[in-house]
Image (cartoon, helix red, strand yellow):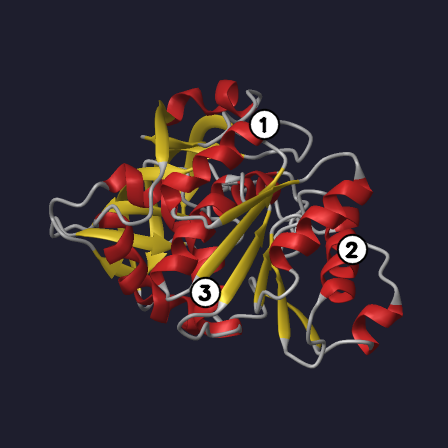
Amino acid sequence: MVLVNAAVVTSFDEPPHHQPFELPAVGGGQEVVEVLAVGLHPRTRSGASGTHYTSTGVLPMVPGIDGVGRRADGTLVYFAADDDTIGTLAARTVIDSRRSVALPPDADVVAIAAAMNPAMSSWVALRTRVPIEPGQSVLVLGATGNAGSMAVEVAKLLGAGRVVGAGRDRARLDALGDRGVDDIVALTDDREATARALADAAADVDIVLDFVWGRPAADAMVALVTARSDRGREMNWIEIGSTAGPTLELPSAVLRSANFRLQGSGQGSVTPRGYLAELPALVDEIDAGRIGVQTRTVPLADVERIWAEPDVPGVRTVLVP
């Protein structure tokens, strides 16, 4: 029996507790790695609360969906968890070697742990769900969140000619100019004014990366389709996140009156093999600093305390054993 210190969820109504956890036996294609850094992503929190759509409800569990670790031979690796109950928030964990990619020996392990998950959402969407063509225009709905602000940079890196960022946090919206945004739209409580602003800035975009969903997304769909100069020109709406709510009410005319395609991007719509194929290129971009991320590091032993603290806007918390 191998016990390791880990963030252990024993009840979905409580934060994880830092306590010993028994690692399972290593099977074929698996190995034990020393964990160096793990990003505290929203997906990690939803898994720990049992609310993510992939949750099996099995307890006890160790949350965490990815991380950076060190193999027995000293090689640094980025790895993705392949089990809902044996996650990455631990001093050591068992990984599927096929779901990992080697890192340079001088890689910034904290930056990679922080940025891979949020950056991957838009990277995979624009590489596999709707492969972006050079010069196409993109609207990032929810551009002031961590994943959304990275999506601006990702879109530019992958060839977007014009990127519009829309979000509620005015200060972070204004700062998107440093990330290459071409135009910004403030999402406000004035639905009519917001709809006009979106229509003026983004009616003719080719792709929408939607991190908000809910009523703001429905309002945006109506505004863009109504104002589109050529409704026969294809618009691809990619649903990635749901910070504004898990459901929306959408007039059927939006789908009938324009060449409007709505699809999602996430676990299930993209295969594990599809995600893995994108890891090396994305690691290179993050390690080269072309996708920016602000981080703060917290000891894994403080997981229970940090769990109750609100996220700092624009900063990704990274837990280090």
- Circle 3 is placed at which residue position? 124
Q: Residue at x 84, y 61 (%)?
A: 250
- Circle 2 is placed at which residue position? 218
Q: Residue at x 36, y 26 (%)?
A: 296
Q: Is residue 306 found left or right of 4 in the rendered image?
A: right
**Is residue 303 something one can see in this rendering?**
yes
Q: CA distance from mark 3 to mark 2?
A: 23 Å
Q: Residues within 10 Å of mark 2 (few under 14, many from 20)?
A: some
Which sits earlier in the primary sequence, circle 2 or circle 1? 1
Q: Is residue 34 found left or right of 63 in the rendered image?
A: left
Which sits earlier in the primary sequence, circle 3 or circle 1? 1
Mark number, residue 223: none
In this rendering, the answer to whether 269 lies above or below 80 is below
Q: Is residue 288 found left or right of 92 in the rendered image?
A: left
Q: Position of residue 180 (x, y in %)?
A: 39, 48
- From the image, state whether disc 2 or disc 1 is nearer to you: 2
Label 3, secondary structure: give it.
helix
Which sits earlier in the primary sequence, circle 3 or circle 2? 3
Q: Position of residue 85 (x, y in %)?
A: 52, 49
Mark number, residue 15: 1
Label 2, secondary structure: give it.
helix
Instruction: Name the quarter where the N terminus is drawn.
Output: top left
271 or 87, nearer to the observer: 271
Q: The residue under label 1 is which amino acid type?
A: Pro
Q: Are marks 3 and 2 in contact (CB under 8 Å)?
A: no
